Amino acid sequence: MAETSDPRPDGSGVSPSFLRDARGLQRKLVEEYYARLGSPDRSRPVAYMLVGGNLAEIVRSFGYEVVFPEIVALNCAIKHQSLDNILHAESMGYGLDVCGYVKNDLGLQDRDGRTSFGQIPRPDLLVCSFSGCYVYVKWWEALAESYGVPLFMFDVPYMREEHPRKEDIDYLVSQLWDLIHLLEKRTGRAFDMDALKGMLVESRRAEDGWVDFLRAGRLRPSPIEAYFESIFYMFPINVLRGTREAADFYGVVNEEVRARVRDRTYPLPEEKVRVLVEGVPPYTNYRTFWDFFRKWGAVSVVATYPKVGGLFDRGFRHDPARPFESIAEYSLGAYVNQSWPLRRKIIADYVREYRADAAIIHGIKSCRSFTAGQGDLRDWLNRDQGLPTLYIESDHEDPRYFAPAQIKNRMDAFFESLEQRRAVGAAGGPATA
Amino acid sequence: MSEIVAGVDIGSTTAKCVVLGEDARVLGKSLNAVGVDIVRDAERALDAALAEAQIPRSEVAFITGTGYGRYKVYFGQLVVTEISCHARGASFLFPGTRLVVDIGGQDTKAIRINDAGEVVDFAMNDKCAAGTGRFLDVCANALGYEVGQIGPLSLQARHAVKVTSTCTVFAESEVTSYVSRGKDPKDILAGLHASIVNRTLSLMQRVGVEPEVTFTGGVSQNAGMVHALQHRLGRPVNVSPLSQYLGALGAALHGRERVRGGAG
C-alpha cells in the first residue's frame, strides 16, 4: 500500500550509482558495433540472423558481419523510434496483428535503414536460424524476395524432451554443412575449422561469465536486476558472442557485481519482493515499467527473457572439441524452442533456486510463439505451485499497446495484495476492520 | 483522537465518497460525475459526503484515495487500489464473500478474496471497455433509452436475442441491426445483459468461481445485470444499495485500520 505521493526513490529508472563501469562499457560496445555496420569503409559482407539458436560463429568465421533485426528493432523501440517504422510497414500493407519486430524491420528498411544509433546495412545473406515461429519464416522469405539475396532456412525441430535426440543433432549438423557449403560458395573462402574453434573458445568464456552474472540473483538481497539490468548485458552474449570483447565484457560485469556485494550496493535500498519475470519486455516503456516494480521494492532476481539467446545457465556451453554437435545442441535448446512442459520445469526450478516470492508474466501482442501458453502458466503457478503470479499484456515494439494506467493499476493491486498477506502473516492472523 | 475516516473513490466515470463514523457506520456518502478536473471532483465528493454526514472536515482523522484517480486525492494520507478496496468493502458488508465481481464504467474485475477480505487473486478485462458500464451506456443510447431504464426493461424480455459481439463499437452495430429487423428492444436488452455476463464469467472462472459472490460497482445497481448474473450462476449473488460505494467504503476501512494502528 502506498503513501499518497507515489514516490520514486531516486527518479525514473535506476540510480546512476548502481550502474557504473559495465553499463558504460556495454554502451561503448553497442556504439562500436553500429559504427562498424554503418561505416562507408566496411568491406565485410552482412548476414541477417535471428537471435534464438543463432549460428553466429560459423557465419563470422567466413568474415561476415552479423545483423540481428530483432535487436535493431528493440533498440528502435527503447529509443522511441519503432512506431514510425511500424506505421510505415502498415502503410505498405502489413496488418495490425503482424509482429512488431517484423514491421519495425520492414518499415525501417523501406525508409533506408536510418536510425539514431546507426545506419543498418542491407543483407548479403539471410540465415533464418529459428524456424519455430512461422511468422519469422515468412518474414525471412519476404526479405529474400525484397533484397534478392540467398536465404538459408535452418530447420530446427521443436523440443519436447529435455535432452536432444541423436537423430535431431545429426539432422542439424547436416544442415550446418549445407550452410558451410553455401558460405564457401558465396565468399570463395574455404571453411576454416581452427577459426571456428577459436571463436567457440571465446563463446564459452562469455557464456561462463554471463552465467556467473545471472546466478548472482540467487543471493539475498540480489546484487543484480535479473530482468531490467540483464537487458543491457544481453547485447554482448547475443550480438558479439564468439569475440574476445564479449568474453572480456563479462569479466568487467562480474567484477562490478562483486563490488556491489562488498559495498552493499543493491538495485534498491530494500529488497521487499523477489520476483521471477517471464516474457519479453515492453521496450517502448522500459523505464516506466521498471518504475512500477521499484515503487514496491520489487527486484527481479531471475527472468526467462535473458535466456532467449541460450539457456547457458542450464548447463549448455559451446564446445570447441565438439563444434558442430554443440552448435546443434545450442540451436535446439533455444528457450522458445522448448515445449511448455519444459518451460514450466525451467520456471519451477528458477522459483526454487532463486527463492522467488512472486512471478510477473508480461505477454506481448506481437509474439504468439513466446506468449501463447502464458495464461495457462499463470494459472499453473498460482494454483499448482502456490506462487502469486500476475499476467499483464502490452507489446515489445508497438507503444500503442502499452496502457500505463491499466498496467500500473494491476501491478499496484498485485504488490499491494502481497504486502497485505505478508502483514497478516507477520501478525499471526487476519487483521480485522 | 477522532476515528472518523473517509474514503474517496475516483473512478473512470464517477467519484464516490464514504464517511465512516467511529463505530464503522456510514455517516455520509456522495456520488458525482467525473470531469476533466479530477482534483476538484475529489474535493466535491468529500465535501458532499461530509455535508450529508453533517461533519466538518477538521473532524476527519484519515482520508484514503482509491480508483484510477487515487493519486489526485491530494488531501488524503494513503492510496490503495480499488481492487483491494472493493475486496475489503464487500467483505465488510458480506463477510462470507469469497469472490467479488466489480463492474464499473470502464473496467470489469473478478477478485477472489480470503476470510479477512484480502485479495488472493484477481483478473480484469483487457484495456478496451467491452462488457463494462460504458458498453451499457452506448447500447442504451443506441436504443433511445436512459441507462437507468434498461435493466428493468430487460427483465420483461420474452425471447432474448443473442448478442455475439463483446466489442462496444460492434455491439452498437449489432443492436442497430436487430432494431432494423424489428426485434423487441426488451429482447435486445436481455441479450446485451447476457453477453456482458458471459464475458464476466470468463474473468470469474480465471480466478475461480466461489460459492458466495458479491456484485459491486455502478453496474451492480442494474437489476437486469443482477438477474442475468444470478441466472447464469444458478444462485443468488450479494448486492446492496451501497454496492456502488464499496470502493470508497473499502478505502475508508483501510484508513480506519491505520487510525487504529493496524496494517491497513
Image: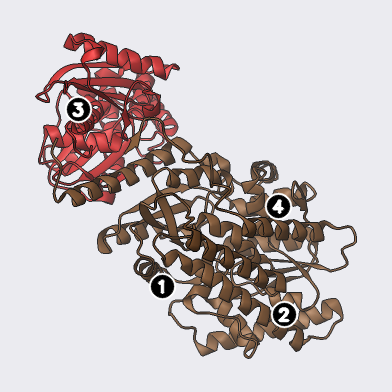
Chain colours: A brown, B red
Q: Are marks 4 and 2 on the same chain?
A: yes
Q: Tag 4's secondary structure? A: helix
Q: Tag 1's secondary structure? A: helix
Q: Point out the tag, 1 or 4, that comes first from the N-terminus.
A: 4
Q: Point out the tag, 4 or 2, that comes first from the N-terminus.
A: 4
The residue that label 1 is drawn on is A342
Q: Is residue B144 visible?
A: no
Q: Point out the tag, 2 or 1, that comes first from the N-terminus.
A: 2
Q: Is residue B50 visible?
A: yes
Instruction: Please give the chain letter of the residue carrying mark 3.
Output: B
For the residues labelled 3 and 2, say whether their Cβ atoms are less than 8 Å apart: no
Q: Nearer the viewer, residue A422 or B161?
A: A422
Amino acid type, residue under disc 1 in the picture:
Leu
Q: Residues within 10 Å of mark 4 (few under 14, many from 20)?
A: many
* Pair 4/3: label in front: 3
Separation of disc 2 and disc 1 at Cα? 29 Å
Amino acid type, residue under disc 4 in the picture:
Leu
Residue A185 percent across, percent down from the top left: 83, 80
Q: What's the mark number on residue A106? A: 4
Q: Tag 3's secondary structure? A: helix
Q: Give the residue displayed 33% in from the left and 26% down from the top.
A: B136
The residue that label 3 is drawn on is B243
Q: Are marks 3 and 1 on the same chain?
A: no
